[in-house]
Amino acid sequence: MDAIDREIILATQDGLPLEERPYHAVAARLAIAPEEVMTRMRTMLARGVIRRIGAVPNHYALGYVANGMTVWDVADDRVDALGERVGRLDFVSHCYRRPRRPPLWPYNLFAMVHGHDRAEVEAGAEAIAHLLGDACIGRDILYSSRILKKTGLRLRPDTAAPSGT
């Protein structure tokens, strides 16, 4: 990562500008060509320097105020295939496998379900249960009690780039 890559990260780490041409706005701010911003961001994405470029909607502002992390105890030999199917459901925002922590935590599949109310979340959980079928041994729903600010690693503008870049 060179100094220009670092400046692009600093300019975008809190989100792209909410404009019709956000890469052009970043380019203007950094006094470089928009094509260079786009090329460098694609390269950083391919190299794993940045993980993704995408929208992160505020589900509360969209009216989805009931949020339940559904947790499932799924047969180990079927969890990966079934987890992929659960992750494709339109009411599941993210789905992942985690290790069990017996004896207190038997769950190995997690799926976040958003709804306008708890009844909608519970209906989503029922749909997941139906999809999992007899591979599901147990389940629960953990409801959000407050909003947590989620951010990844942030670079500080006042620190120099590592030497050799």
Image (spheres, helix red, strand yellow):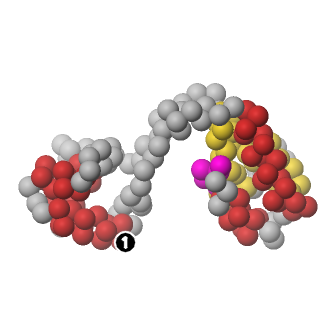
Question: Which corner quadrant holds the N terminus?
Answer: bottom left
Q: Nearer the viewer, residue 93 or 154?
A: 93
Looking at the image, the residue that sits furthest to the left is 31
Q: Is residue 145 left or right of residue 140?
A: left
Q: Position of residue 61 (x, y in %)?
A: 50, 32
Q: Is residue 41 above or below residue 30?
A: below
Secondary structure, magenta segment, majority class: strand
Q: Is residue 98 visible?
A: no
The residue lying at 80 percent from left, 69 percent from top is 78
Are there few (<14), some (14-19), or many (20+) residues within 10 Å of tag 1? few
Q: Nearer the viewer, residue 4 or 164?
A: 4
Question: Which corner quadrant holds the C terminus?
Answer: bottom left
Specify the amino acid type for callout 1.
Ala
Q: Position of residue 130 (x, y in %)?
A: 84, 55
Q: How many marks?
A: 1
Q: Which residues are magenta?
A: 91-95
Q: Nearer the viewer, residue 113 or 1?
A: 113
Q: Is residue 71 above or below residue 116?
A: below
Q: Is residue 100 visible?
A: yes
The residue lying at 41 percent from left, 60 percent from top is 52
Please identify the quarter of the rendering in which residue 46 is found: bottom left
Q: Is residue 65 above or below residue 130?
A: above
Per the image, the residue denoted by label 1 is 46
Whether 89 is among the magenta residues is no
Looking at the image, the residue that sits furthest to the front is 20
Q: Position of residue 127 (x, y in %)?
A: 79, 51
Q: Is residue 158 above or below residue 161?
A: above
Q: Nearer the viewer, residue 153 or 93?
A: 93
Element on which disc 1 rests? helix
The residue lying at 70 percent from left, 51 percent from top is 110
The residue lying at 67 percent from left, 57 percent from top is 89
